[in-house]
Image (spheres, grey):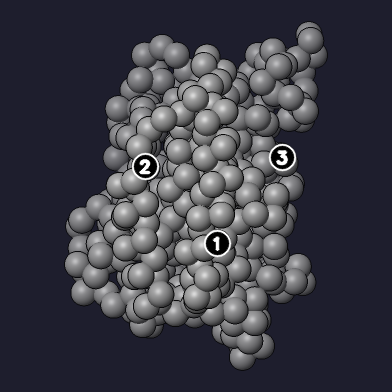
């Protein structure tokens, strides 16, 4: 049996904490897509920890953590994370596995990412410059190197061949940065990776499922950044939706049971791209300040706005969401009035669907107003204790989406979750 947990907005929904919370109910936590542009924030023993590639179940010592083939893996980032986890007394070599079909991010991928973004000028997409896009391009172009190649005695030869191809592309961009230090770090990290448990991921996970083990598939980024269904071209390079579980882990569709969709009680976005409910005035700045809305990976200020039920309904539809987890609900404690986007004004009509090219479609969000609860909910632990105004806010969202909020996160700590 496989359950899926993924983001329903533009990423940064707080998935790391939620995976960490659900992890005790599962035997295996498996990342199925994305790269080190993901930043899943956990609080372990009161200390903030950001994981970029290691699954968020790593702090539960008796759980298996698998990096699936749908991920693009930066060996340098992985080694740094491994050291960070080890500082908490966790031996990752015991419960961290890496699928051999997982593609590697090379130093030259990072250089290509930077060169490409610079060349776009004012039309930058807001890449994190981690090399994710170029690595996925090599994957679909059938040029990439994979984790399983590390065990081949000719790996260095394969690396040089691909590196030379990349250099020709870099020359065409006029990119002359010296990446020799990156390469030195890379080969040190490659030696480290050879000490990890490299497995045939699809057989590994399907054997576990046949044994009756429970799997939680952990997504990165968010549904509105999906390469097919997101706000193209301002998207990530992978399939962030539930369908990506099948290709990113080698799991058949009928193995998937529940799909947990994670959304904030409001909405944020990092980087460029359309954002219909973005608030440019004081309210948006208050959301950013109270919610500490700065990127876990980049540190960039997040753009903030009211919750967008049109986009959320679209994300629930394409993912087959069965349960919703709402995070950062406590951020709204200080707001006297709340707005909820229920339709888009497009060409003089009200529309409840996401347009094909949102970035080229003028959208005026239509809002319904709700009273705020003006109450500190961070210490509340059950649904009955929540303010009536908050219950009304949640009820409206449930009715609009046709999918119910099953859990409400009301603070950053593990215990700050209310079951509905």
Q: Which residue appears at 39% of the width and 70% of the height? A: 193
Q: Is residue 403 above or below residue 56?
A: above
* Residue 371 in picture, x, y percent from top left: 47, 26
Q: Between residue 195 and residue 346, name the one nearer to us.
A: 195
Q: Between residue 342 and residue 233, name the one nearer to us.
A: 233
Q: Which residue appears at 37% of the width and 78% of the height? A: 195
Q: Between residue 291 and residue 169, name the one nearer to us.
A: 169
CA gap between label 3 and label 1 equals 34 Å
SS for tag 3?
A: loop
CA gap between label 2 and label 3 equals 34 Å
Apparent side of residue 144 relative to residue 417 in the rendered image (left or right): right
- Label drawn at residue 205: none
Apparent side of residue 9 relative to residue 192 in the rendered image (left or right): right
- Crowd class of label 1 (few under 14; some 14 to 19; many from 20; radius 10 Å): some
Q: Residue furthest top?
A: 348
Q: Between residue 418 and residue 159, name the one nearer to us.
A: 159
CA gap between label 1 and label 2 equals 18 Å
Sequence-wise, the earlier of marks 1 and 2 is 1
| Residue placed under numbered mark 3 in the picture | 229
- Crowd class of label 2 (few under 14; some 14 to 19; many from 20; radius 10 Å): few
SS for tag 2?
A: loop
| Residue placed under numbered mark 2 in the picture | 179
- Label drawn at residue 158: 1
- Tell me, yes or no, whether the two marked residues, 1 and 2, touch with CB atoms within 8 Å: no
- Residue 355 visible, this orientation: yes
């Amino acid at each position: 049996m496989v359950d899926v947990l993924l983001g329903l907005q533009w990423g940064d929904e707080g998935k790391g904490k939620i995976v960490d919370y659900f992890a005790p109910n599962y035997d295996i936590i498996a990342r199925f897509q994305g790269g080190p542009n993901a930043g899943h924030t956990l609080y372990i023993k009161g200390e903030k920890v950001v994981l970029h590639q290691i699954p968020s179940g790593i702090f539960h010592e008796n759980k298996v953590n698998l990096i699936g083939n749908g991920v693009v893996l930066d060996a340098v980032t992985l080694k740094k994370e491994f050291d960070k986890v080890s500082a908490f007394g966790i031996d990752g070599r015991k419960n961290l596995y890496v699928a051999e079909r997982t593609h590697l991010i090379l130093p030259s991928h990072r250089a290509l990412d930077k060169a490409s973004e610079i060349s776009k000028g004012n039309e930058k997409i807001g890449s994190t410059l981690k090399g994710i896009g170029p690595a996925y391009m090599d994957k679909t172009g059938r040029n990439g190197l994979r984790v399983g190649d590390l065990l081949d005695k000719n790996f260095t030869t394969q690396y040089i061949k691909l590196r030379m191809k990349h250099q020709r592309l870099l020359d065409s961009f006029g990119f002359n940065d010296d990446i020799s230090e990156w390469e030195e770090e890379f080969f040190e990290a490659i030696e480290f990776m050879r000490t990890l448990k490299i497995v045939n991921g699809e057989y590994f996970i399907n054997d576990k499922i046949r044994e009756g083990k429970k799997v939680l598939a952990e997504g990165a980024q968010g549904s509105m950044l999906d390469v097919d269904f997101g706000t193209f071209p301002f998207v990530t390079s992978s399939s962030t939706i539930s369908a990506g579980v099948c290709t990113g882990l080698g799991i058949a569709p009928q193995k998937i049971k529940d799909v947990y969709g994670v959304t904030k009680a409001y909405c944020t976005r990092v980087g460029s791209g359309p954002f219909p409910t973005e608030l440019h005035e004081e309210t948006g700045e208050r959301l950013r300040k109270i919610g500490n809305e700065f990127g876990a990976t980049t540190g960039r200020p997040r753009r903030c706005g009211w919750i967008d039920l049109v986009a959320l309904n679209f994300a629930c539809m394409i993912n087959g969401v069965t349960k919703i987890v709402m995070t950062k609900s406590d951020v709204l404690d200080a707001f006297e009035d709340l707005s909820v986007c229920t339709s888009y004004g497009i060409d003089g009509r009200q529309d409840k669907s996401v347009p094909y090219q949102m970035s080229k479609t003028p959208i005026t969000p239509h809002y319904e107003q709700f009273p705020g609860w003006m109450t500190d909910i961070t210490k509340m632990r059950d649904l009955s204790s929540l303010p009536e105004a908050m219950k009304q806010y949640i009820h409206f969202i449930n009715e609009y989406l046709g999918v119910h909020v099953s859990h409400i996160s009301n603070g950053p700590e593990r215990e700050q979750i209310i079951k509905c």
